[in-house]
Amino acid sequence: MTRFGRGRLRRILLGAIPFLVLGTLWQMNAVYRWLAPIHMPPPAAVWSAIFTLQEGCPGLLDALRQGSGCLLTNHILSSMGRVALSLLVGLPLGIAFGVLAGIHRRLGNALEPVGVFANAISGIAWVPLAIVWFGVGWRTTLFILLNTVFWLVFFNTLLGVRGVPRVYEHGVLALGATRWKVITQVYVPGALPSIVTGIRMSMGFGWRALIAAEMIGGDRGLGFMLFVSAQEYKTEEVFLGVLVIAVIWMLTDRACLVPLERWTIERWGLVWRPS
Amino acid sequence: MSSLSVARPDLLRSARARRFWRHGGLELALVTLLALALWTAISASIARPDRYLPSPVSVLDSSRDLLWKGILPNYLGQTLWRLVTGSLIGIALGIPFGILVGLNRTVSEMCYPILNFFQSISGIALLPIVMIWWGTTEKTVFVVVLYTCFFPIAFSVLTGVRSTPRIYVNALRTLGASRLRIVRDVLLPGAMPSIATGARLSIGYAWRAVIAGEMLAGRRGIGWMIFSAQQVDRTAQVVLGMALIGVLWILLDRYVLRPIESDTIQRWGLVQR
């Protein structure tokens, strides 16, 4: 398959049509005033909202240093920093505990309902309690995100490790492998497709939960920006925020998570399973 | 005859009980007890447990008042009603939409990116805009839940329809089947597994959207209950609401959504590709 064949070009061109139609309708609405600008701001206003928010920001370096004038980039960096931190902490913890629980059959059976229950209330339902514990601020939002990421990764790792056929473990053990070798050579590779699915799910649910948590219990971040702008009826900033949220998620999902998942399943997912 | 009818429920109960204990029932009971004990111990050892972590007993105690006044059933009913209406209408609109779009290759290639785009804007992120449009009304929550439900299901139906092997469609077409016939006999059964999986996923998203919508738009319901209880410092009610949210979702998932999904996959999912 060529990387940029005719089929791909055709798909891109066809896929652009609905976006163009929607954009045209949006612009026509700005010209003919079908809906009031406070309900549906014109595209130009959304575009200029970027510059209004970034007014006091002299340059790229200042934006990266989170200078006080760079409102938009600060909110973006703040949200994404929390995502990075929760991945850095939540992933290793989730995978480690998941593998540990998955190896021990009884422990796995015992911890499975805990995972089910934790996943059932993960995300937004924790926000009020997190506010009581940590107050309004970054710690609450980080807690919500970590909570979502950890339990989903833990649960999927547990299921993945349990699904690895015992034959492989026995085979490797019979060849004289140590316990550690069994974990790194059998359990983790065998569970990888499930782990990666867990990571993708945790990002999907976690990103949504983060936005919601920032609205209710945060003091910075994209969700907070949306909420404050909406309260001040700055609809163009709300639109900008929603677009930024969608673009960030699409880029992460399409450019990182989906290829990662596909590659893992191709590489490790199609092992033979004894019937 | 009479001895049989007496003996049978007994037999059933013991068989069911044995199955329960063998399939992790003992572990479940132990873990629940352990978690409750741990919770009690933590809440007994911290300062001001009423504010930070009320003990299980006081959480249960807080439900008495709510139950007696009829607030809790009312809130639960409202939340479930929002979830059911929003997600059922969303699914009922999303499935035909996905099939219609999936019928034609050009149309489906055209709509795939935009559906993907709207699917990645979560309903919760749209809530502030919808609140500017319609204020904190019932309509706001309903629209957000509908939106949250519609796009994931439409997207997965579209993917399901497109991944049905063309050879079946062509086979029916050479036998002279009409379009309607192809939809009914090939595309719909072929898309059934992805419809079921998509429905479960989108109801999962909708459940979170209902909770968030109640919190932010201030409509009475279980999400609103935990949000407002936090504001007046009644942490016991917050924990009670969280536990109810978890239990409700597990019941819904285990006894409604998952059986539907696994039955569907069992019935339609094992088609040769």
Image: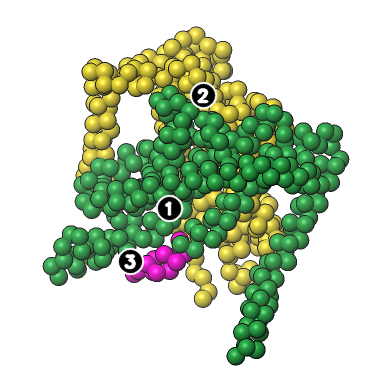
Chain colours: A yellow, B green
Q: Nearer the viewer, residue A79 or B82?
A: B82
Residue A51 seen in render? yes
What is the C-alpha distance between the residues marked 1 and 2?
29 Å
Dominant secondary structure of the residues highlighted in magenta in the image: helix
User: Left or right: where does residue B93 sit relative to residue A211?
Assistant: left
Q: Residue furthest right?
A: B45
Mark 2 or 3, which is nearer the eye?
2
Q: Could you confirm whether marks 1 and 2 are on the same chain?
A: no
Q: Which residue is mark 2?
A: A227
In percent of the image, x 26 and y 48: which residue is there?
Answer: B101
Magenta span contains residue B272: yes
Q: Which residue is mark 3?
A: B273
User: Left or right: where does residue B246 sit relative to residue B236?
Assistant: left
What is the C-alpha distance between the residues marked 2 and 3?
47 Å
> Where is residue A244 drawn, in percent x and y?
43, 28
- Disc 1 residue type (three-letter): Ala
Image quarter (top left, top right, bottom left or bottom right) of the C terminus of chain B: bottom left
Q: Which residue is mark 1?
A: B199
Q: From what the image shows, is residue B205 above or below residue A19?
A: below
Disc 1 crowd rating (10 Å Cα; few below 14, some 14-19, many 20+) is many
Q: Are marks 2 and 3 in contact (CB under 8 Å)?
A: no
> Who comes first in sequence, dot 3 or dot 1?
1
Q: Chain of mark 2?
A: A
What is the C-alpha distance between the residues marked 3 and 1?
22 Å
Q: Chain of mark 1?
A: B
Which stretch is magenta? B261-273
- Disc 3 residue type (three-letter): Arg
